[in-house]
C-alpha cells in the first residue's frame, strides 16, 4: 500500500492510500479515518462509507463533518472510491456521470468490457476489509452506510451479508434500482439484459425475498426536497417490502432537505451514534 497523504484531525488521523486491487485488476484509492483511541493501543471497529455517483474517496471525508463523532465513539471510517479507475478501465461510452467511472454501483459486472475491472461488490465485501484488518489496529466488527448509489450499496451488501456487519444505514438511498432510470442503466450495462441477475443487487427485492439469518438494525434518512426522490430513490418501495416482511426499519423524512452533502452533514451525528450502539456492544 502507498500512503498518498495524511492529516491530523480531531485528535485522530485522516489518511489516503493507493493499492493494487486483485479483484478490480487496477490500482484503487481509499481513505481511512483513525480516531485517537488507536494511540492508546485500542482496536477500533470500522464503519464503511459508500459514496454516490460522481464521488471518490474524498467527498465524504471533506464534506460530511464526521471526524468529531467518529472520535467521540472510537470508530474508524473507511471511504473507498466508487469505481475502478485508470488506464484501460472502461467508461460510459458518452462519458455520462451515472455509469462507468465514479458509478460502479457496488456490483460484480459480468458484461464486457466491464467485467474485468468492475468488481466493486467483492472489493467492498472481501478485499478491502481484509486489507484494513491486516494494516490497521481495527477489530473485526464493522457496519456499513452510504449515500444514494452508496446507500443502495450499503443496503444490498448489509442485507446479503448480515453475519458480517452489525448495522446498516443510508442517506437518500436508491432502494429499488430495477425500477428507476439510474439503476436500469447501470444493471443492464454491468449485468446484461437478463433481469433475474439484477435481483440480488436490489434492496427492495432482497427485502421481499429473504428470511434473514440476522435482522440487522437499519436506519434511513431522506430529505423531502430531494431532487431525485420521485424518479430515482422511491423509499416507499423498500419500506412497504420491509413492513410485509415484518422487518422494522428506522426511517425519517426531513422537511426541506435536498440530496446534497448539506443534508448528510446535518444528520451524520445521529448515524454515527446509531452504528456506535451496535459496534461498541460487548
Ligand atoms: N451531476 C449530477 C448529480 C450527481 C450527484 O448529485 N451526485 C451525488 C450522489 S447522487 C447518487 O448517487 C453526490 O454525492 N455528489 C458529490 C458531491 O460531493 O456532492 C447532476 O447534475 O444531476
Image: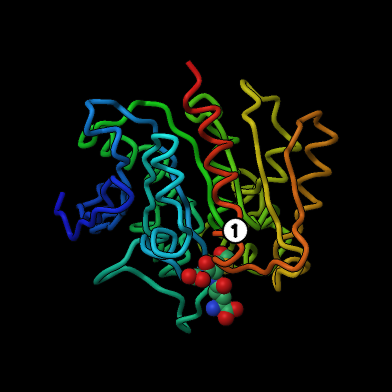
Residue 211 pos. (x, y %): 70, 25
Residue 256 pos. (x, y %): 75, 68
**Residue beneath disc 1:** 266
Q: Residue at x 62, y 60 (%)?
A: 193
**Viewed as shown, does residue 128 lie left or right of 69?**
left
Residue 99 visible somewhere in the drawing:
no
Q: Residue at x 66, y 54 (%)?
A: 195
Which residue sits furthest bottom?
Answer: 94
The answer to whether residue 282 is above or below residue 177 is above
The answer to whether residue 154 is above or below residue 233 is above
- Ligand 1 image-quadrant field: bottom right
The answer to whether residue 62 is above or below residue 110 is below
Q: Secondary structure at mark 1?
A: helix
Which residue sits furthest top?
Answer: 282
The answer to which of 157 and 23 lies nearer the viewer is: 157
Residue 131 visible somewhere in the drawing:
yes
The answer to which of 23 and 47 lies nearer the viewer is: 47
Residue 163 pos. (x, y %): 52, 24
The answer to which of 33 and 164 lies nearer the viewer is: 33
Residue 73 pos. (x, y %): 44, 35
**Viewed as shown, does residue 121 lie left or right of 238?**
left
Amino acid at each position: 500500500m502507498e500512503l498518498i497523504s495524511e492529516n491530523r484531525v480531531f485528535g485522530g488521523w485522516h489518511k489516503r492510500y493507493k493499492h493494487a486491487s486483485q479483484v478490480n485488476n487496477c490500482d484503487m484509492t481509499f481513505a481511512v479515518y483513525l480516531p485517537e483511541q488507536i494511540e492508546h493501543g485500542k482496536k477500533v471497529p470500522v464503519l464503511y462509507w459508500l459514496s454516490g455517483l460522481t464521488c471518490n474517496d474524498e467527498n465524504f471525508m471533506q464534506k460530511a463533518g464526521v471526524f468529531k463523532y467518529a472520535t467521540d465513539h472510537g470508530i474508524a471510517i473507511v471511504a473507498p472510491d466508487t469505481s475502478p479507475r485508470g488506464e484501460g478501465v472502461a467508461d460510459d461510452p458518452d462519458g455520462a456521470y451515472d455509469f462507468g467511472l465514479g458509478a460502479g454501483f457496488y456490483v460484480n459486472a459480468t458484461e464486457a468490457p466491464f467485467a474485468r475491472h468492475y468488481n466493486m461488490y467483492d472489493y467492498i465485501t472481501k478485499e478491502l476489509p481484509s486489507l484494513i484488518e491486516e494494516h490497521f489496529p481495527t477489530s473485526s466488527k464493522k457496519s456499513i452506510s452510504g449515500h444514494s448509489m452508496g446507500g443502495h450499496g450499503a443496503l444490498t451488501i448489509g442485507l446479503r451479508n448480515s453475519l458480517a456487519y452489525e448495522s446498516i444505514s443510508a442517506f437518500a438511498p436508491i432502494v429499488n434500482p430495477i425500477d428507476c432510470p439510474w439503476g436500469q442503466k447501470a444493471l443492464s450495462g454491468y449485468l446484461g439484459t437478463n433481469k433475474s441477475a439484477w435481483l440480488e443487487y436490489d434492496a427492495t427485492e432482497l427485502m421481499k425475498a429473504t428470511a434473514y439469518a440476522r435482522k440487522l438494525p437499519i436506519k434511513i434518512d431522506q430529505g423531502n426536497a430531494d431532487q431525485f426522490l420521485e424518479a430515482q430513490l422511491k423509499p416507499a418501495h423498500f419500506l412497504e417490502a420491509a413492513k410485509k416482511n415484518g422487518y422494522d426499519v428506522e426511517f425519517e423524512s426531513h422537511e426541506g432537505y435536498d440530496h446534497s452533502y448539506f443534508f448528510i452533514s446535518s444528520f451524520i451525528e445521529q448515524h454515527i451514534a446509531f452504528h456506535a450502539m451496535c459496534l461498541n456492544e460487548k
